[in-house]
Amino acid sequence: MAVTGNARRVIQVNQSIIGPCAPRSKTVRAKKVSDYPGVPRAHRELAKKLSSPLLLGPPICDELMAFIQHTFTEEEAALVRHIRPLKGRSAEDVAAIEHRPVDEVELILRRLAFEKRAIGCDGAADNRRYMLMPIMPGIFEMVLIGESPDSLTQWHRRFAELFEALYETGYILDYQDRRMPMVRFLPVGGALGAHPMALPSDKLEVVLDRYETFGVGHCQCRMSSQSVGEGCGRPLEVCTVMGRWAELGIEAGWLRRVRRQNVLEIKREAESHGLVTWVMNVESTGGQASCSCCGCCCKAMRTVSEFSAPGVMAPPHFMPRFDPPACTHCGRCAKACPMGAITVDTSAETLNHQPARCIGCGLCMLACEQQRAVSIEPVPDYRLPYKSWFSLLMRNAPGMLQTTWKVWRSR
């Protein structure tokens, strides 16, 4: 399927040069909470919490304030401003702080967690704790995860529009030194084939073998882009969840139950449209998630393809190797790259590859099937996926805290 003309451009053709578009610069204009005297106090206090560098938050700005005022009513914001990330708070605790009846507070928080999905929730019905989520990853994905293009309301469309405006300020550049490799990309099946250096963790089939329950939903990034008129036309129902996470999503009605074979068919179809598959960079048996992404819509990939920031992607296991004698400098590999990691000058007959932008997906190799001038080779110092979320956090915590401190001081 061809990418539609309304999609954001990742690759540009400038005379004889085929390569990435120029990186976007940060345009966010930081303000203070006191600059918004006309905004209700509850919204201002919630904006301050969600702007925290610990939550990868943007600075206080017009775009953030507009997003929060739309996402939460004043009554909802008055309650949400009291909940915390990770440990959360019970409805009883929030009710006591707000001096309101517990049943009223519980009703509002439950609606926010299970219908709007703008806050997190953990625990059984008689012991629920409600948690504050980051805007991204967090609120953006969860609000849209249970929707489809047909179910999106005007509220959802406005939500997507305001989030996009906030994302495009480039506030994510504040965290360009913060490396948290939460996701890893798998080489596409046609490129990996029977590669002798492939590991079990490189193969989606092996990843799926750990689980019995599978659910599928619509890609939040592509659906959001489509709703604001910048969709690329590629498949939407590709977001896959496995294990316990899938059971929860299916039970809540956010996901459609599918079988293992269905997942493989969905992923193969997605790859035929130039999409690349990621999985969480942890070999957890409790749950796993995967989506099939494009460089023009995926927020994680756009941190690199548009803003040249490292994002949350783990270094790849494979990198392309180019065979100069076989290369005709046709530029197909550069056009196929979802990250803009390849630049080809068809006139000067030069090729430049930027490893820092490469996710090792192998699409460039598939694009060069005729000349066979591209192959994929393993990276010598490749680090295996983490065994647990705890090990991922412990290894990356020092760098995360350093960047958080740096952002906090700069604001």
Image (cartoon, rainbow, N blue to C red):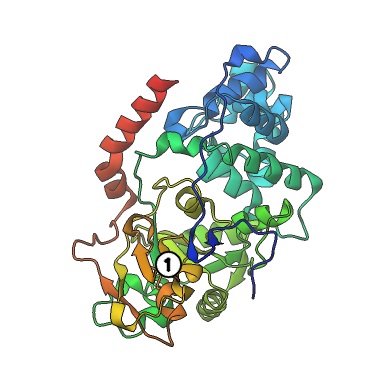
SS of the residue under disc 1: strand
The residue sitting at the right extreme is 154
Decide which of 132, 9 is in the foreground and name it: 9
Decide which of 177, 99 is in the foreground and name it: 177
Q: How many marks?
A: 1
The residue sitting at the left extreme is 380
| Residue 326 on image: x %, y % | 33, 83
Decide which of 175, 324 is in the foreground and name it: 324
Q: Is residue 359 above or below residue 402?
A: below
| Residue 271 on image: x %, y % | 52, 75
Amino acid type, residue under disc 1 in the picture: Val
Q: Is residue 245 left or right of residue 314?
A: right
Q: Is residue 1 above or below residue 155?
A: below
Give the quarter of the image for residue 376: bottom left
Residue annotated with mark 1: 344
State the residue at coordinates (52%, 59%): 295
Q: Is residue 309 shown to the viewer in this render?
A: yes
Decide which of 259, 369 is in the foreground and name it: 369
Looking at the rendered image, the quarter that the N terminus falls into is bottom right
Give the quarter of the image for residue 280: bottom left
Q: Is residue 102 shown to the viewer in this render?
A: no
10 Å crowding of disc 1: few (<14), some (14-19), many (20+)? many
